[in-house]
Amino acid sequence: MRSPQVLFLVGYIPQIIGVYFSLVELLDAARSDANDALTAALQRLETALGERRSSTVQNVTRLHSLLEQADIVVPGHPRTPDDFYTMREAVMDEVSTALEKDVERETVFLLGWVLGDATWTLNLLSQIRLFRALQPSHPLLLEQQSQRVSELREQTLKLSTLADSKLISESMRMAVRLCASIVSSVVTRAVDSSMDEPADSLLAQAAADDTALRALATQAQVLERDCPKT
């Protein structure tokens, strides 16, 4: 059954899965030019990712279960970042095709997708800042931080647009407005910071990012609850 609640989750969960695979990519890429402190932190992340693998598998299994409920078939259980991006693209293509004549349900799906995307990006930004606190001038991390902030700026605009949609309930619009405000505040902090900021500032920014992530997760739960179940 293609209920709005199911479709919201079908949009949201792939992005949460993406956090794991993007961190795998970051781990591999950041090893180049890493100093001793960053190398040790990367090793700790590698251990943590091993522990997170099972929860990622559970999310993939849940996603396929929800897709089945929506009568949408997307093959594959990703094992590598490339596998994941292929699966994610297939989810977007198949769901968009299935909902091309149902604008209301497509809007809820896109809401889950954009909110999940912002959550994914903010997770990466927080981790990048923690790494930069150990090696502020690492070239890849500097580039990655700039890219993630740019993505968050775009995601703020998308959330703001969705918050004005008359195709979702007023309670959902209020939650989306709050999400847009949360992400916008992260972008504002990033604009006010400098690329050569000291370690203590980067750590404080990462802590603020984590607070924003918790706030976004709370609103995701509110939106899931308020989505129609039929």
Image (cartoon, rainbow, N blue to C red):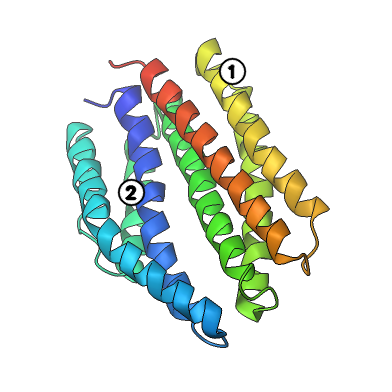
Report the side of 84 relative to 210 (left or right). Answer: left
- Going by the numbered disc 1, the residue's amino acid type is Met
Who is closer to the viewer here, 25 or 151? 25
Query: Quarter-wise, where is residue 42 in the image?
Result: bottom left
Q: Quadrant of the C terminus?
A: top left
Residue 91 badge: 2
Q: Is residue 172 found left or right of 189 in the rendered image?
A: left
Q: Residue at x 62, y 58 (%)?
A: 148
Residue 43 figure quarter: bottom left
Residue at image location 45% in from the left, 26% down from the top: 103
Q: How many marks?
A: 2
Looking at the rendered structure, the secondary structure element under dot 2 is helix
The residue under the point 64% across, 76% down is 135
Which residue is disc 1 drawn over?
174
Residue type pointed to by label 2 = Val
Percent coordinates x, y for residue 170 in the rendering: 55, 11
Q: CA distance from mark 2 to mark 1?
A: 27 Å
Task: For residue 180, say whether it is visible.
Answer: yes
